[in-house]
Structures are given as structure tokens and as C-alpha cells.
Image (spheres, grey):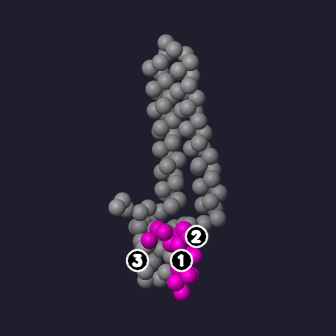
Amino acid sequence: MKPYKNKINRIRSFALSLIFIGVVIMYLGIFFRSNEIIMLIFMVLGLLAILGSTVVYAWIGTLSTKAVQIVCPNCGKATKMLGRVDMCGHCREPLTLDPSLEGKEFDESYNRPNRQNEQTDKK
């Protein structure tokens, strides 16, 4: 199982990868200089990937302003938290603001609404 990362950092990494993917797609279009239509298609697809990255960055920026800022008990640095459970962006310490999840093993599925319904049904 791959290590879990902070949600905000994971989404920012995805947006950064969209930029690089867009540049690579545009670069591949250069190999089709003799056929302008194919070159134009590659350039437009690369531009769309970069524009998609801009949209993702704007979305995570607005989401980040609404995120709860807390101080990590492990490293003492301020980090932003999305959802019921998240990881510290600096030391990957599991964090939660939900008292019912204190002391439980970290599970990303605690953030899913259907998981919350299952827990209330068990009580």
C-alpha cells in the first residue's frame, strides 16, 4: 500500500503533473511539423491539460482557504486539514478533529459519507 499524503499536497501534485503532461503533449506535436492538423491537435490537447491544471490550482486554492488550520502535535508546525481525518503536511502524522476517532488506526475511508453512516448505524 502506498503511503498516504496530505490531501492538499496530493491535489497540488496532481495539478503540477498536469502542467508537465501538457508540455510533453505539446512537445510531441513538434514531431508532426509536416502535418499541421496533427500538430495543431497535439498543441490544443497540451494547452487543455495546462488549462485544466490552472482550474485545479484555483479550486484547491479556494478549498485551502476554507481548510481548518491546526498545529501538529508531533512536529509542532501549522498544517491545514481537510475532512475528518488527514495527515500532517510536514511529518505525516495522522490527524483528526473528531473525538470519536481518537486513538483509532488511520483510515482514509473515515472521510467518505457512507462510512460515517455505517458508524452511526453500529452505535
Q: Helix or strand or loop: what does disc 3 sit on? A: loop
Q: Which residue is most to the top?
A: 34
Residue 19 vs 109, above or below: the answer is: above
- Disc nearest the viewer among 3 and 2: 2
**Depth check, front residue: 20 or 118:** 118
Q: Does the image show residue 118?
A: yes
Residue linked to disc 2: 113
Residue type at tag 3: Glu
Confirm or deny contact between disc 1 and disc 2 (CB under 8 A).
no
Which quadrant would residue 75 be assigned to in this image? bottom left
- Mark with earlier residue (1, 2): 2
Specify whether residue 10 is painted magenta: no
**Depth check, front residue: 70 or 94:** 94
- Mark with earlier residue (3, 2): 3
* Residue 88 image point, x, y percent: 46, 68
Residue linked to disc 3: 105
Q: Which residues are magenta?
A: 107-123
Q: Could you tell me which residue is drawn at 34 percent across and 61 percent down?
A: 1
Q: Could you tell me which residue is drawn at 54 percent across and 68 percent down?
A: 112
- Disc nearest the viewer among 3 and 1: 1
Q: Could you tell me which residue is drawn at 58 percent across and 29 percent down?
A: 44
Q: Residues within 10 Å of mark 2 (few under 14, many from 20)?
A: few
- Mark with earlier residue (3, 1): 3
Q: Which mark is residue 118?
A: 1
- Disc nearest the viewer among 1 and 2: 1
Residue 47 vs 66, above or below: the answer is: above
Residue type at tag 1: Glu
Q: Number of labelled discs?
A: 3
